[in-house]
């Protein structure tokens, strides 16, 4: 069984593109289920039914907000693996950038609002993850927030400013989290529970 991870793309020097994955994300996914093998996906990777989860990691900006080479390349890899996972009906997890990438495909409305640090979110009543009216603190590292999603998407959690922090798209089995579950000193049960619901 395999978890595929779409990496962050960096460009620290001119004409250099780096495929990056945070070691903490690998550690988080290994703790999620030790039976999974983790594979980093690039533009030449092939996925099949052996993959039980595709993770679209954080980092990068959407191409609607950036024309940098690194973001264009990230968009290419996202598109390739999103379409394949959707076709094979493989569950998908989007973390921060990964969540906004898929939300954008479903006509999300965004606002430019830089957030860095801890913030409170509120889980609302939903069919995916029953954590009604429970305030939770999450980390935030983003330049854009999701203001609105279309009616096909189930909203799971809102920030105190009413921007969307978690959502689920049943028809493609996609969970979007606008925080980074891998960036805690001690991984949290609530994050594992959310992802296990997806699996």
Image (spheres, rainbow, N blue to C red):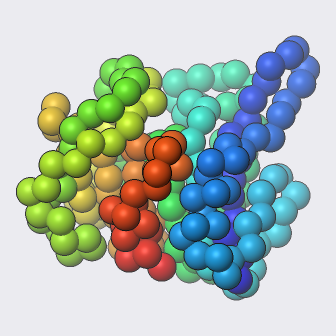
Relative to 117, residue 197 above or below: below
- Note whether residue 102 is visible: no
Q: Is residue 164 left or right of residue 191?
A: left
Q: Nearer the viewer, residue 70 or 22?
A: 22
Q: Nearer the viewer, residue 2 or 175?
A: 2
- Note whether residue 136 is visible: yes
Q: Position of residue 93 (x, y in %)?
A: 51, 61
Identity of the residue furthest to the right in this view: 15
Q: Is residue 69 left or right of residue 167?
A: right
Q: Position of residue 117 (x, y in %)?
A: 37, 27
Identity of the residue furthest to the front in this view: 186
Q: Residue at x 37, y 70 (%)?
A: 193
Quadrant where the N terminus sits is bottom right
Relative to 23, residue 3 above or below: below
Tally of marks: 0
Q: Residue at x 19, y 71 (%)?
A: 130
Q: Residue at x 77, y 57 (%)?
A: 40
Q: Position of residue 36 (x, y in %)?
A: 68, 77
Q: Position of residue 140 (x, y in %)?
A: 39, 33
Identity of the residue furthest to the left in this view: 133
Q: Residue at x 32, y 52 (%)?
A: 166
């Amino acid at each position: 069984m395999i978890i595929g991870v779409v990496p962050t793309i960096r460009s620290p020097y001119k004409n250099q593109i780096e495929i990056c994955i945070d070691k903490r994300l690998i550690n988080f996914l290994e703790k999620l289920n030790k039976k999974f093998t983790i594979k980093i996906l690039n533009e030449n990777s092939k996925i099949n039914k052996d993959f039980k989860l595709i993770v679209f990691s954080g980092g990068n900006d959407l191409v609607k907000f950036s024309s940098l080479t690194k973001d264009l390349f990230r968009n290419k890899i996202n598109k390739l693996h999103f379409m394949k996972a959707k076709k094979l009906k493989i569950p998908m997890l989007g973390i921060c950038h990964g969540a906004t990438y898929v939300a954008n495909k479903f006509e999300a409305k965004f606002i430019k609002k830089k957030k860095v640090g801890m913030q409170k979110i509120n889980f609302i009543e939903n069919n995916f993850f029953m954590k009604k009216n429970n305030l939770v603190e999450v980390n935030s590292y983003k330049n854009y927030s999701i203001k609105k999603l279309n009616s096909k998407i189930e909203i799971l959690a809102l920030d105190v400013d009413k921007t969307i922090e978690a959502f689920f798209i049943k028809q493609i089995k996609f969970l979007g989290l606008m925080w980074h579950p891998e960036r805690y000193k001690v991984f949290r049960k609530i994050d594992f529970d959310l992802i296990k619901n997806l699996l």
